[in-house]
Amino acid sequence: MIEIKHRYTDVVLRTVEDLRGADLVGADLGGAYLRDADLVGADLGGAYLRDADLGGADLGGADLGGADLRGAYLRDADLRRADLRRADLRVAYLGDADLRGADLRDVYLRGADLRDADLGDQWIIQGATSSQGYAFFLERLTRDGAPMIKAGCFRGTIGQARARWSAPDYHRGAVVGQELIEIVDSLVRIAEIRGLMK
C-alpha cells in the first residue's frame, strides 16, 4: 500500500495499492507530497491538488481534466499526452515541465510559471490584463488550426476577437473594445517577434 501524505505534515490523505493508472477521480489531495510519483495513466479528473508537490512526477497520459492544481509545484513533471482540459493551474509552477502533446484546451493559467517548460509544437503567450480584470493569452495548441485569443470566457481566432471587440454594438462600448483590440495587437506583435507567427 502507498500512503499519500500531506506536503507539510505527516497526515495521510489517502492510501492506494498503486499510483500508476490509479482511479483518483475527485480525490482531495490538497497539499499532497507526490514528488517523483509514478502516476502514468492515472485518472485525476476533478481532483483537488491545490498546493500539491508533484515535482518530477510522471503524469504521462494522466487525466487531469478539471483538476484544481492552483499553486501546485510541477517542476520537471512529465505531463506528456496528459489531459489538462479545464484544469486550474493558476499560480502553479511548471518550470522545466514536459507538456509535449498535452491537451491544454481551456486551461486556467493566470499567474502560472511556465519558464523553460517544453510545450513541443504548442505555445502560449500571456499578455496584459484588461481594465475589466481579464487576463489575455495568445496560444496555439495541438488541436488548434490557428492561433487563438483567450480572455475570460472568450476563446476565438484573432479575426474573431477583433470583429467582436470592434463591432459598433459591442456591449461594453467603443473605448473598452479599443483597449481589448490593443491587447490582442500587442500579443500578435510579440508572437511575430518570437517568430511564432508571420
Image (cartoon, grey):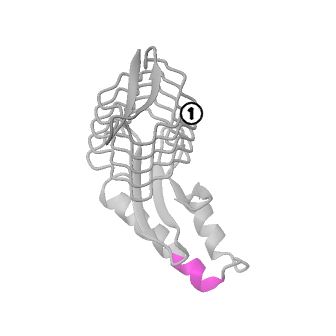
| In the rendered image, the vertical position of residue 111 relative to residue 67, given as above or below | below
Tell me the kind of residue under disc 1: Gly
Residue for point 36% across, 51% down = 196
Q: Can residue 82 be seen here?
A: yes
Residue situated in front as seen by the camera: 3 or 90: 3
Residue 164: quarter of image? bottom right
Q: Residue 175 colored magenta?
A: yes
| In the rendered image, the vertical position of residue 40 relative to residue 44, given as above or below | above
Residue 169: quarter of image? bottom right
Quarter of the C terminus within the rendering: bottom left
Expressed as whole percent of the image width and height from the top left, the position of residue 120 reads 36, 37
Residue 175: quarter of image? bottom right
Tag 1 residue: 45
- Residue reaching furthest to the bottom: 175
Residue for point 58% across, 81% down = 176
**In-image side of 111 versus 159 (left or right):** left
Expressed as whole percent of the image width and height from the top left, the position of residue 92 reads 38, 49
Residue for point 46% across, 52% down = 139
Q: Secondary structure at mark 1?
A: loop
Q: Can residue 197 be seen here?
A: no
Q: What's the magenta region?
A: 173-179
Residue for point 46% across, 57% down = 138
| In the rendered image, the vertical position of residue 95 relative to residue 169, given as above or below | above
- Within 10 Å of disc 1 (Cα), the crowding (few <14, some 14-19, many 20+) is many
Expressed as whole percent of the image width and height from the top left, the position of residue 178 reads 55, 80
Specify the principal SS of the magenta part: helix
Expressed as whole percent of the image width and height from the top left, the position of residue 94 reads 33, 44
The mark tally for this picture is 1
**In-image side of 137 versus 165 (left or right):** left
- Residue reaching furthest to the right: 169
